[in-house]
Image: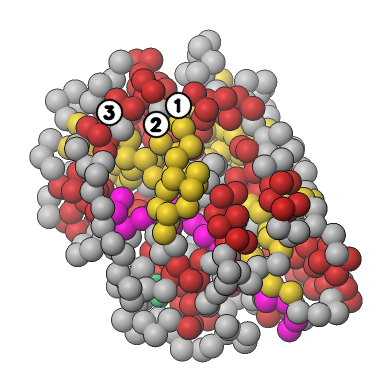
Amino acid sequence: MKFVDEYRDAKAAHELAKRIKAVVTQPWTIMEICGGQTHAIVRFGIDELLPPDITLVHGPGCPVCVTALELIEKAIEIASAPDVIFCSFGDMLRVPGLHRDLLAVKAAGGDVRIVYSPLDALKLATENPDKQVVFFAVGFETTAPANGMAAYQAHRLGVRNFSLLVSHVLVPPAMEAILGSPHNQVQGFLAAGHVCTVMGYHEYEPIAAKYKTPIVVTGFEPVDILQGILMCVTQLEQGRYEVENPYSRVVTREGNIPAQKLLSDVFEVVARKWRGIGEINNSGLALRGEYRQYDAELRFGLADRKIEESAECISGLILQGIKKPHDCPAFGTRCTPEHPLGATMVSSEGACAAYYRYRGATASGRRAG
Amino acid sequence: MCLAIPGKVISIAGDDPVFRMGKVDFGGVIKEVNLCYVPEVKLGDYVIIHVGFALNIIDEEEAQKVFEYLREMEMLGSELGEAN
Ligand code: SF4
């Protein structure tokens, strides 16, 4: 593990940890929902710096981890088809499907390409008019404006051989699903700064009020995270439940208005399946109206395909804060980053991969559970 | 894959707001970036970029801080879409 002392602002981090200790009088469980925060917490041992009364649990903050098995299988099927160029962000290639991943499709001769931006995929479509170019549009609200714009530009430019396999997910409905569950353990949330860059944070205000749960918008550096924890714990101790934003140097309450406008033009809100968690109402985006002609599921006739998840992986419980990675019997044995069984072991922002990399295969985190 | 990384706008091209592109300097790595979501951006501004789109204008100090952090975390390459 890389301890917080190796972090360049270690002094500020220790100072914040001290202030948190001074405030806490009873146990609290706080969830972050940003893969960048999960990675930083585990890498720098931020959880170990905190008083034992505070438990951090790692929510569904990584789009790679929550993309449903069903969609991975659809991606594999489309990518295996002739005359298709299948484009994806690199992280998605190793997410396990039922029998293989996209990397295996590529190894078997499929034209699977890693792109940096959805616009790169759109460009490939204009350069290869005799191929169907499909982009795997995964992501949270941060990524949706980029993917939505690719559909918008395709429509404006009349690029007909381009489509999107859309797997967009929305953060606030997932928070509600976690808080509304009878097994919920989460008492306070850190909200992901970069998601809020696009959407602002006004959406969280009704959630904080309804579930009497403080929500603090924060960045992904150790000092930001610790500052967020301090504010969250202070609210909990004082019996307050507000949305606070110490990350105002990047995030405003309103968010990016032109991006929100584009999202509502191109997408509609739909129910979406989250890997390991199941379907959550109003938690995803799908192409709407005239943009549906760019929906790869419709173009390839896959819309009705349903696939059940394997029971072995407990990542769904981990993503809801009910279990920690070390609680999984497959962790570090049958499931490793080289041979992941579940998506949370694939991405460095997934909780299982972060624990494996920085905590080792067997060590049980100090307060695991 | 959800992080946005800061960079400096060093050129802006195109009149159509939807297709307006700029070159952005990420500590020496130059990338083409779509500027449709930051219509008020000017040359020399710092923006945060996610998968080829500028999402917000931020100040230089914040940009440097985040950039250094991502470099320390060795996360810059993957967020810039390099070998994964
Ligand atoms: S260790 Fe592997 S199988 Fe277990 S929960 Fe994590 S990803 Fe799933």
Q: Please give left or right for residue A360 compared with residue A80 in the image.
A: right
Q: Is residue A189 above or below residue A137?
A: below
- The residue at the far top in this view is B15
Q: Which is in the foreground here, disc 3 or disc 2?
A: 2
Residue A124 falls in image quadrant: top left
Which comes sooner in the sequence, label 3 or label 2?
Answer: 3
User: Disc number at residue A162?
Assistant: 3
User: What are the residue bounds of the magenta stretch?
Assistant: A52-71
Task: Identify the amino acid type marked 3.
Answer: Phe
Residue A219 visible, this orientation: no
Instruction: State the separation of the CA atoms marked 3 and 2.
Output: 13 Å
Is residue A63 inside the magenta stretch? yes
Which residue is tagged 1?
Answer: A266
* Residue at left offset 48%, top offset 77%: A325
Residue A204 in the image: x percent, y percent? 69, 47
The mark found on residue A287 in the picture is 2
Colour mapping? secondary structure
Say left or right for B36 vs A191.
Answer: left
Mark 1: amino acid: Val
* Residue A173 in picture, x, y percent from top left: 56, 50
Q: Give yes or no for contact between labels 1 and 2 (Cβ–Cβ under 8 Å).
A: yes
Disc 1 is placed on an element classified as: helix
Residue A347 screen position, x and y as percent: 43, 62
Q: CA distance from mark 1 to mark 3?
A: 15 Å
* B3 within the magenta span: no
Q: Nearer the viewer, mark 1 or mark 3?
A: 1
Q: Secondary structure at mark 2?
A: strand
N-terminal of the two: label 1 or label 2? 1
